Image (cartoon, helix red, strand yellow):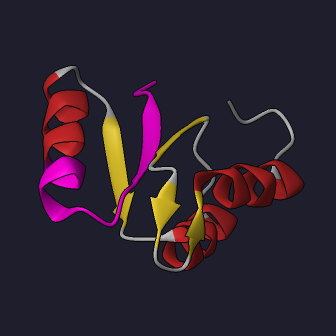
Amino acid sequence: MTPSVLVVDDDVAMRAALEANFRRQGWKVRTAKGKNEALELFKYEPAPLVVTDMRMPDGSGLEVAKGVRAIVPLTK
């Protein structure tokens, strides 16, 4: 089974770099540019790992973490 990650960052270059690194290691990667998009994606296709920026225009990484944990409590 291919590992899956959701990368959340409002910085396009950082998001692209993280995506490229995870893909190179064989991960299935989905990306979001902010908290709202991330939670919407996560709701329909949860990932066992979420990597998030801490400060974004529409919310914080802590809000992303709280949101994903509300949907799937075992997410890291």
Residue 65 spot, x, y in % from top left:
70, 49
Q: Position of residue 67 (x, y in %)?
A: 77, 61
- Residue visible at 20% across and 49% down in the picture: 14
If the image is split into quadrants, where does the C terminus sit? top right
Image check: 71 left or right of 46? right
Q: Residue at x 57, y 44 (%)?
A: 47
Q: Is residue 18 left or right of residue 73?
A: left
Measuring from the top left, give residue 4's x and y in whole percent: 45, 37
Q: Which residues are magenta?
A: 1-16
Which residue is drawn at the image coordinates 24% and 24% (left, top)? Answer: 26
Query: Vertically, is 43 above or below 37?
Result: above
Q: What residue appears at the point 51 percent right and 50 percent down from the top-left corner?
A: 54
Residue 35, given in percent of the width and then of the height, sits at 56, 70
Q: Is residue 6 left or right of residue 48?
A: left
Q: Is residue 33 magenta?
A: no
**36 w.r.t. 52: above or below:** below
